[in-house]
Image: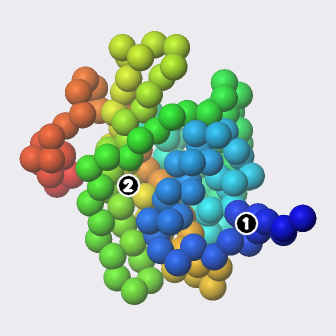
Amino acid sequence: MPHTMSISSKIFNTAEETESAFYDAIRRADLDAVMALWADEEDIVCIHPGARRLIGHAAIRASWESMFEQGGIDIRPIQLHVTQNMLTSVHSIIEDVQRAVAPQSDIHILATNVYAKTAAGWRLVAHHSSVVPGEAPSDRAVAALLH
């Protein structure tokens, strides 16, 4: 039987690989996989839409655990804008959230994901998101909203 590497021991060579694994884990409601993608530091930060700022693994884990009680969340990142240097990658995206129970009420979320290059590969250090009402903003509107 082949040995499969757990996500916590996997080395992600790019921030994009980490981000892809992050949204895949959210879709599957895989709490351990989501948390394995965060950096080991305790000053990691997560802000969900309309919620307070969470700092540290315990608070962030509890928030995802609560969200996953209803199952996974189908989020499709669109309109990615990346600013990157050797050790940090900042991804500004729109999250297109698909809801199985009420597709007509799909929402769009402006999100910023910040990744740091660590000894364990690229890991998430901050996730900040807020709801955008209505249709997904065009690229031009996004630029205006981010400044």
Provide the residue designation for mark 2: 112
Asked whether residue 43 appears in the rendered view, the answer is no
Q: Nearer the viewer, residue 107 or 40?
A: 107
Q: Nearer the viewer, residue 144 or 8?
A: 8
Mark with earlier residue (1, 2): 1
Identify the residue at horizontal 38%, vertical 23% (top origin). Answer: 106
Q: Nearer the viewer, residue 137 or 7?
A: 7
Q: Residue furthest front?
A: 1
Using the image, determine if residue 91 lies above or below residue 63: below
Q: Nearer the viewer, residue 128 or 34?
A: 34
Label 2, secondary structure: give it: strand
Identify the residue at horizontal 46%, vertical 38% (top origin). Answer: 75
Dot 1 crowding, Cα within 10 Å, few <14, some 14–19, many 20+: some
Amino acid under disc 2: Thr
Asked whether residue 74 appears in the rendered view, the answer is yes
Label 1, secondary structure: give it: loop
Query: Residue 112's x, y, as percent?
Result: 38, 54
Query: Residue 3's x, y, as percent?
Result: 84, 69
Query: Residue 64's x, y, as percent?
Result: 65, 41
Identify the residue at horizontal 56%, vertical 54% (top origin). Answer: 22
Provide the residue designation for mark 1: 8
